Image (spheres, rainbow, N blue to C red):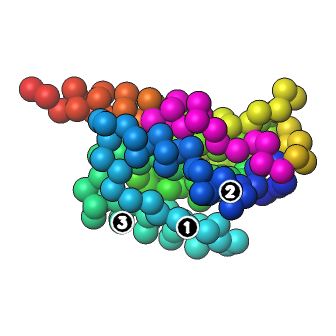
């Protein structure tokens, strides 16, 4: 599997990205930045990528991150690793990905707040361009998950 027609984000989607719109308009969240990375082919590079993204987020002293992947299958290797590396550094994480009926190729215990942006009834790729993309509701769910994780972490740290 991999990136397909229905999960492919068009340039119009980027100009009107619902995740950025939702997060940047939320009064409780300080949007610190956006990190855009590709999906390497080999696993060594995938793990290196996850480490570097987590190092960058840690250096920025971020409390939370929403990670999104427009593909599935092999893309989930670096997606899951990045979530794990962020979580191990104490950074709260929620995510967005096409999951559908195929599920994750790789997962871990930190992938407990992932929003599936599959829109097809049967849970499979549809071939209709942009049909299975993040929308505003998906973005709001991911932000709510992130806020809950950050709140839970804050309560755990309180005396």
**Mark 2 and 1 residues: CB-CB less than 8 Å, in contact?**
no
Whole-angstrom CA distance, mark 2 to mark 1, is: 19 Å
State the image coordinates of residue 137 (x, y, percent, origin top left). Answer: 59, 30
Looking at the rendered structure, the secondary structure element under dot 2 is: helix
Q: Which of marks 3 and 1 is nearer the N terminus?
A: 1
Q: Which of marks 2 and 1 is nearer the N terminus?
A: 2
Q: Please determine whether, in this image, residue 52 is positioned above or below residue 7.
A: below
Please give the residue where the numbered disc 1 appears in the rendered image: 37
Please give the residue where the numbered disc 2 appears in the rendered image: 12
Q: Can residue 56 be seen in this view?
A: yes
Looking at the rendered structure, the secondary structure element under dot 3 is: helix
State the image coordinates of residue 40 (x, y, percent, origin top left). Answer: 65, 71
Residue at 88% x, 46% y: name it: 128
Q: In this view, does 32 lie to the left or right of 84?
A: left
- Tell me if residue 139 is in the magenta stretch: yes
Quadrant of residue 117 in the image? top right
Residue at 36% x, 65% y: name it: 56
Residue at 66% x, 53% y: name it: 13
The residues colored magenta run 129-143
Please give the residue where the numbered disc 3 appears in the rendered image: 56
Q: Can residue 43 be seen in this view?
A: no
Total marks placed: 3
Give the camera-side residue of 58 and 9.
Answer: 9
State the image coordinates of residue 111 (x, y, percent, origin top left). Answer: 53, 39
Residue 152 numbered tag: none
Whole-angstrom CA distance, mark 2 to mark 3, is: 28 Å
């Amino acid at each position: 599997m991999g990136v397909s027609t229905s999960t492919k984000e068009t340039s119009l989607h980027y100009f009107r990205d619902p995740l950025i719109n939702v997060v940047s308009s939320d009064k409780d969240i300080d949007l610190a930045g956006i990190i855009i990375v590709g999906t390497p082919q080999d696993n060594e590079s995938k793990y290196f990528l996850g480490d570097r993204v987590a190092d960058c987020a840690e250096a920025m002293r971020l409390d939370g991150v929403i990670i999104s992947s427009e593909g599935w299958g092999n893309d989930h290797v670096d997606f899951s690793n990045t979530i794990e590396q962020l979580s191990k550094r104490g950074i709260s994480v929620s995510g967005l990905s096409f999951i559908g009926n195929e599920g994750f190729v790789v997962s871990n215990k930190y992938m407990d707040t992932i929003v599936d942006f599959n829109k097809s009834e049967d849970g499979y790729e549809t071939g209709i361009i942009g049909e299975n993309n993040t929308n505003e509701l998906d973005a709001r769910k991911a932000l709510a998950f992130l806020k809950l994780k950050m709140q839970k972490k804050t309560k755990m740290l309180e005396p």
